[in-house]
Amino acid sequence: MVPGVPAWGAAGVNCVLLLGGTDVTLAVAEAVVASGAQLSAVVSVAPQFSISYSREKITNVRRADLATWCEAHGIRHIAFESYAAILADLDGMQPDLCLVAGWYHMVPSNFRERFSCGCYGFHASLLPQLRGGAPLNWAILSGMNETGVTLFELGDGVDDGRVFGQERFPIGARTTIGELVKASRNACARLALSLLPVILDRSLAGRPQTGVPSYALQRRPEDGRIDWTRSVAEIDTLIRATGRPYPGAFTELEGEEIRVWSAAPADGLPKVLGLPGQIACIAESGFPCVVAQDDMLVIHEATDTDGECRLDKLRKSGHKRFAR
């Protein structure tokens, strides 16, 4: 037991178990504490972990240090090994409710059924839109002008349970994935703070999902490779959809991998004739430009894989070509 923390399921205390491993998990954990419920434990995944759709281990690029946060708040932290191991760690005691935020695994029914108030997850889309993986990235890549987050009841399907709350936010013409990550994190915290009390007292029934569902498949870091034969709009969208906190869009110049973090269409600049991937350094732009299929893209931020700025290198690479 953690000193000073009531036992699991202590009389009169609404106990919550939280599964996750990211910045969203941390935001939801803080909201649970602020709501007055007892956050009995946080279960988090390792920085790298195995998952069914990848032969190699997945890196949790949005990892939060939940162990340190739990220690500072006197809350039990459990490193995830298996659902059976979580139940063993509970040692016969049982929280009322399970929340899942920033989690990468399906939650089996024999685990969900242990919670008298149910098991609920946060998903970064307006369900039933974009069920599945990488919904914020796909929202930008698919040209959506709005998305949001959903608090829903977990079931045996993929993100198809009853909806208990949603919050919307816009996607502008220049919105980046970093901005959507922040918006979704804050929205999840607000939903947790406002809805947790009514879920725990069972006064909120939820509603079935309505509308035609869509599904999003998981993405890998290599999906960020830039194809300079694509249009400026497509490349610009890829850069905005894969930037920080994700690994970023990338290309290669003379064998060196270059990460492009920020760019924009070359509106108002002189027309440059060249081949896709060719670098143009013109006086009218203070930044290096790259020819795409239909126009040029202006590169505002680019680094090597260690994070060192490579704009000066690109400025000295006029007429050279990125690998396509």
Image: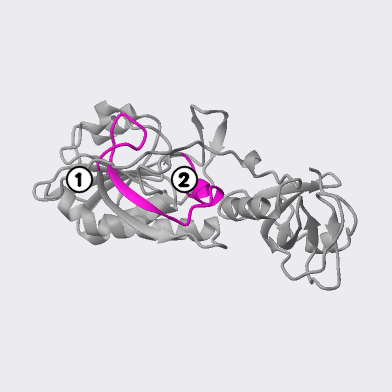
Three-letter amino acid code at the position of disc 2? Pro
| Label ID, residue 289 | none
Residue occupying image coordinates x 85% and y 61%: 272
Above or below, 27 against 252 in this view is below
- The answer to whether marks 2 and 1 mark residues whose Cβ atoms lie closer than 8 Å is no
CA gap, disc 2 and disc 1: 22 Å
Is 140 in the magenta?
yes
- Image height of 193 relative to 84, above or below: below
Q: Which residue is drawn at 79% across and 72% down?
A: 286
Task: Judge left or right: residue 4 versus residue 26.
Answer: left
Q: What residue type is labelled 1?
A: Gly
Residue toward you, 319 or 296: 296
Image position, residue 60 (x, y; %)? 51, 43
Q: Is residue 94 above or below residue 109?
A: below
Colour convention of the picture: one colour
The mark total stands at 2
Query: In the image, 97: left or right of 127?
Result: left
Q: Mark 1 — residue?
A: 206
Under circle 2, the secondary element is helix
Where are the magenta residues, as a range? Answer: 133-162
Question: Which residue corresponds to mark 2?
Answer: 135
Image quarter for residue 148?
bottom left
Q: Which of marks 2 and 1 is nearer the N terminus?
A: 2
Residue 296 belongs to the span the image colors magenta: no
